[in-house]
Image: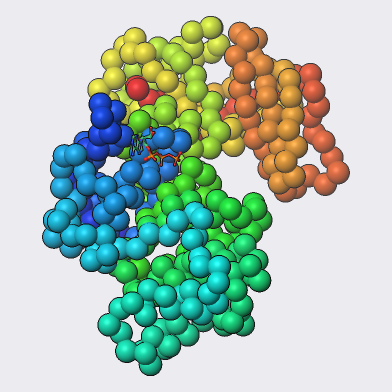
Amino acid sequence: FAPWDDPTKKPLIRFEGVTKRFGDFTAVDNLDLHIYEREFFALLGPSGCGKTTIMRILAGFDPPSEGTVWLDDVNIAPVPPNKRPVNMMFQSYALFPHLSVYDNIAFGLKRSPMPKSEIDGRVQEMLRLTRLEKFARRKPHQISGGQRQRVALARSLAKAPKLLLLDEPLGALDKKLRNDTQFELMDIQEKTGTTFVIVTHDQEEAMTVASRVAVMDNGKLMQVATPDRIYEAPNSVYVADFIGDVNIIEGNLRPQEPGKVLIDWTEGEAPIRAEANGGLTEGTRVSYAVRPEKIAVSAERPDDRANVVQGKIIDIAYLGNISTYHVQLPSGHMISAQMTNSRRIERRDFTWEDTVWLSWTDTAGIVLTQ
Ligand code: ATP
C-alpha cells in the first residue's frame, strides 16, 4: 500500500478547507490536501495558480484566511516560522557571499543550542550527502551554479526539518544540469527520509521527481495523483492538456455494450471506439483525449485496430528519439502522432504530404466529460 491508499496511515500534513485571499482576490480556494511522511510531493501549475502561496502558508510566512493546516496532528497556525519543523529553500538560494560553503551550511546550526562538536559532525554529514567535501572552504562565487544549488540544499537540510519546501529549486540551472540534479534531489530525499514539497511549473520535472503530483489551476486543486495516473488517467481536459502532448477530440457519445462507447465526431470521421465507465447517456457531449504516442502511423491500413483514419502528413518534427507527425484528416482535423525512431537507422519512412493511416486501440484514449 502506498501511504495515500492506506486509510490507517496518518498524513504528515493536512490542509482542511484552506483559503487564502489577498483583498478580494482568492489565491488559494478551499484546499483539502494530505501529504505523507517521506513523500516527494510536487505542486504543479501555471504562473499565478497559487503554488507559492501554499508553500508560504506551510512555512508560516502567511496565515490562511480560512481553514486549518495540521502538521502531525498539531494545528500550526499559532506556531511561528522559526519554531516549525519546516524549512524553505528559495530559487535564489540566498547564500551568504562572504561565508565559505562550510559556514553557509553551519549558519543555522550555530544559532541553535547544538554543541560545537555536534555541529561539525552535522556539517560534515551534509557535505558528504551533497558531495561537496572538496568545496567546503570555497566561497559561493568560487563554485558552479549546480554546486551552489547543493550548498543551499545542504543548508536547508542541516537542521533536519520534517518538511523541506523547495520553490523552483532548479530554475536557475540549464536543462542538462537540471536533469542530472533532479536525480540527485531524489537520491538525497530518499537518503534523508525528509518529506519534500516542490513547486515547479515544469511538468517533466514534477513527473520525474515526485511520488505524487498536484495539478493546480486558479487556486484550485484539479487532480492529485501519482505521475503515471496523472498522465494516463487525467480527470479533466485541463490536466490532460497541461501534462504532455495530447489530442483532444470533441464529440457526442453513443453508448454501446457495457463499457464500450462510440464517439461521433463533429465533422464526420468514422466514430471513435473507446472505453468508458457507465453513467454516460446517448448524446452526452464529451472530450476524448488520446496521447500522440498511442497513435501509430503506417503506410498500409492496419486491420487489427479499433480506430483507423486516413490523413495527410502536414509536418514532421524529428526529435532524435522520436518523431512527431502532424496529420490532417479529410474533415480538416489535425491529429498528432508520435513514433519512436529506435529501430530506424538513416531511414525516413514518411515525408511531408504522404497519405498515411493513423490507428489506435479502443483503450488508448480517455473519455472526459469536463
Ligand atoms: P509563479 O509560478 O509565478 O510563482 P504561483 O503559482 O506560485 O506563481 P502565487 O505566487 O501563489 O502563484 O500567487 C497566486 C496569486 O496570488 C497570483 O495571482 C498573485 O498575484 C497573488 N498574490 C500572491 N501574493 C500576493 C500578495 N501578497 N498580495 C496580493 N496578491 C498576491
Q: Looking at the image, which is closer to me, 228 or 10?
A: 10
In this picture the colour scheme is rainbow
- Residue 50, position as x, y percentages in the image: 35, 38
Vertical order, 36 against 153 (above or below): above
Residue 302: quarter of image = top right
- Residue 86, position as x, y percentages in the image: 30, 63
Q: Is residue 277 left or right of residue 185?
A: left
- Residue 337, position as x, y percentages in the image: 63, 30
**How many labels, in total?**
0
Instruction: Identify the residue at image location x=44%, y=13%.
Output: 251
Q: Is residue 113 left or right of residue 96?
A: left
- Residue 190, position as x, y percentages in the image: 42, 69
Vertical order, 290 against 150 (above or below): above
Whether residue 118 is visible, yes or no, is yes
Q: Looking at the image, which is closer to me, 261 or 189?
A: 189
Instruction: Identify the residue at image location x=49%, y=54%.
Output: 91
Q: Tell which residue pokes out farthest to the front in this image.
A: 98
Vertical order, 107 against 316 (above or below): below
